[in-house]
Image (tube, grey):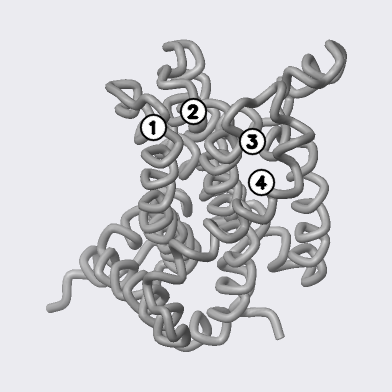
Amino acid sequence: MIDSARTTWDSAARPPRPIEELGELWRGRSLVAALVSRNVKVRYKRSALGVAWSMLSPAGTMLVLSLVFSHVFSASAPAYPAYLFPGLLLWMFFAQSTGSVAAEVAGGIDLWRRVRLPKTAPALATVLTGLVNLGFALVPLGALLLVLRRPVGAALLAAPVVLAAATAFTFGVSLLVSAAALHFPDASDLYGILLQAWMYLTPVLYPVSILPPRLRTAMAWNPMALYVDAFRRPFYENAAPDAATLAGALGLGLATAAAGWIVFTRHADEVPYRG
């Protein structure tokens, strides 16, 4: 005789969708690693320079921007290339990761209809791929600091903490943009326009000190200004951000990641069943 208590599946017994997705992602962690490996291999397989391209491309961008803006901001930011490069690297990581995730998620919808897999896996893999590329790009940054004879020390130990917080923030924004793109395909294009404006509203190219007091106060509402400044400081000033700044960066990053996770996981399940 079959025990009906063992054969009855109660959908109400499922955990909340955000928690269920977390378990699925953990069980599918090998898939995330495979996606990151694929992304890195595909990116550099297409390039004659291979991994060196991830170092030369941001370095070339830094050189061009330095030629254009060094004379403009040299008084406020001595050794301008050393000021520019750390913030530029962090911004490129954020912009490229968040801009690519919506396309990766949209490309995986057909697969979702056929195979059950963690729906956050493509987003996480894209952000981790960006983190790998950023790691490669730190090599020319180190070379630049040596050439310019910038002092470096124990303050660099704060950089991984800031980077972890910025990665959580990037992941959260990526999921929020992806959730919007699931229902409104134009959301990713609109976000691309927003990114262009966001960069100029973030002190990547210019020091905050040149802004009038009112705009400096408004800059406090720009989360990327917080991350760019905190990441730049150990490299450019050989000074670690204070504890309050680090705590704020971590708190904001985790809160954004949690919000993005909840919103995305609640909407992603609806997609495979739409025509």
> Image height check: is 56 above or below 42?
above
Work out how far the residue at label 2 is from the one at label 3, CA to CA, in angstroms. 17 Å
Check if mark 3's residue and mark 4's residue have beta carbons within 8 Å.
Answer: no
Q: Nearer the viewer, mark 1 or mark 2?
A: 2
Q: Quadrant of the N terminus?
A: bottom left
In the image, which disc is placed on residue 236?
A: 2
Q: Nearer the viewer, residue 177 or 264?
A: 177
Q: Which residue is mark 1?
A: 159
Residue 85 image point, x, y percent: 55, 43
Q: Earlier in the sequence, mark 3 or mark 4?
A: 4
Q: Which three-letter amino acid code belongs to the residue tagged 4?
A: Ser
Spatial CA distance of label 3 from label 1 is 15 Å
Q: Which residue is mark 3?
A: 224
Q: Amino acid at mark 3?
A: Met
Taking 168 as reference, is 93 above or below it? below
- The disc placed on residue 66 is 4
- Could you tell which of marks 2 and 4 lies nearer the N-terminus? 4
Q: Tell me the SS state at disc 3.
A: helix
Name the residue rendered at 77%, 72% in the picture.
185
Which residue shows up at 39% across the image and 70% down it?
Answer: 52
Inter-mark Cα distance, 1 to 2:
11 Å
Q: Quadrant of residue 227?
A: top right
**Nearer-N-terminus badge (3/1):** 1
